[in-house]
């Protein structure tokens, strides 16, 4: 049996096992996908050594370890070198190879939303691993990128080739697309939004990378304002499929898997 999993912290809410189990079912793959919930970064090194002994083929990585995981791998794929964060690790010949399939999932999501990003102003809320994947995907799409941070001084050291904004600056900012790349609004803390409703009014499209709940308060604001919006489910599914393609060295049908999953996840 092939073994895969998800590494993160406080991730009981995740839909990832449902996604990967569906891929296994549709393509008759004898495999299991487990959750690995680690409380501290200092546990990662020993944890990875244990996984090596268990013949694990690959793991996904989520909040808050997408950046810190890089200290413990052997090889960085080109997109990880550019982004500075990884969400997919392949175990191969005693080596750990880091990939970023969030980047790929974002490109697929932009396509699904029908976005034309070249020379368009895009504002990203947050500076974590998901934000860095957004920056790479948007940069490759030709967008003009603004990142909102609560600590601009620290962000200046980390983020290059973007314009930085404070949350106060948002009051007088408008643009084509607003992306929430923070965890604010995730289950179970669903009654909060990273920004007020009036901020969303100033954007044409809205994307929340959160997928649980289906509609965050942030997206409910967008809906109330009549803004086209998308949650993070398509990104989640796309990055998960891409991870399985990397681990299994084969291709899968994205639309087939998405259509099978959408009603299963949001019953």
Image (tube, rainbow, N blue to C red):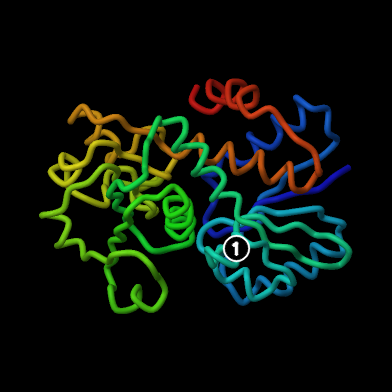
Toward which corner of the image does residue 188 lie, by quadrant? Answer: top left
Toward which corner of the image does residue 146 lie, by quadrant? Answer: bottom left
Residue at 83% over, 33% down: 29
The front one of 119 and 93 is 119
Q: Quadrant of the N terminus?
A: top right
Residue at 64% over, 76% down: 71
Give how far across and how far down residue 267 sits, in percent: 50, 22
Report whether 157 appears left or right of 41.
left
Indicate the secondary structure of the residue bearing disc 1. Answer: helix
The front one of 202 and 128 is 202
Give how far across and how far down residue 120 sits, in percent: 30, 46
Give how far across and how far down residue 172 sits, in percent: 10, 54
The front one of 229 and 263 is 229
Give how far across and how far down residue 136 sits, in percent: 48, 56
Toward which corner of the image does residue 126 lie, by quadrant? Answer: bottom left
Q: Crowding near pointer 1: few (<14 within 10 Å), some, many (20+)?
A: many
Report whether 62 appears left or right of 247.
left
Q: Is residue 160 above or below residue 14?
A: below
Residue under circle 1? 80
Q: Is residue 170 above or below residue 259?
A: below
Residue at 54% over, 60% down: 9
Residue at 79% over, 27% down: 27
């Amino acid at each position: 049996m092939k073994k895969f999993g998800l590494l993160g912290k406080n991730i009981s809410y995740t839909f990832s096992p449902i996604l990967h189990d569906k891929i296994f079912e549709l393509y008759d793959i004898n495999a299991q996908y487990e959750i690995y919930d680690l409380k501290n970064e200092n546990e990662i090194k020993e944890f990875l050594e244990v996984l090596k002994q268990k013949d694990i083929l690959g793991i996904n990585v989520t909040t808050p370890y997408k950046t810190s995981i890089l200290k413990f791998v052997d090889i960085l794929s080109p997109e990880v070198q550019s982004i500075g964060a990884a969400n997919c690790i392949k175990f191969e010949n005693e080596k750990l190879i880091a990939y970023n399939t969030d980047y790929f999932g974002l490109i697929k999501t932009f396509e699904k939303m029908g976005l034309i990003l070249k020379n368009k102003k895009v504002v990203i809320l947050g500076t974590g691993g998901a934000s860095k994947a957004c920056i790479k995907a948007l940069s490759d799409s030709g967008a003009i990128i603004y990142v909102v941070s609560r600590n601009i001084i620290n962000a200046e050291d980390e983020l290059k080739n973007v314009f930085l904004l404070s949350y106060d600056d948002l009051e007088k900012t408008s643009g084509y697309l607003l992306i929430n790349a923070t965890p604010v609004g995730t289950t179970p803390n669903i009654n909060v939004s990273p920004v007020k409703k009036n901020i969303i009014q100033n954007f044409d499209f809205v994307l929340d990378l959160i997928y649980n709940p289906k509609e965050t308060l942030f997206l409910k604001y967008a809906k109330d304002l009549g803004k086209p919006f998308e949650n993070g489910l398509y990104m989640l599914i796309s990055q998960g499929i891409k991870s399985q393609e990397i681990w299994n060295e084969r291709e899968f049908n994205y639309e087939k898997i998405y259509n099978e999953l959408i009603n299963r996840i949001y019953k």
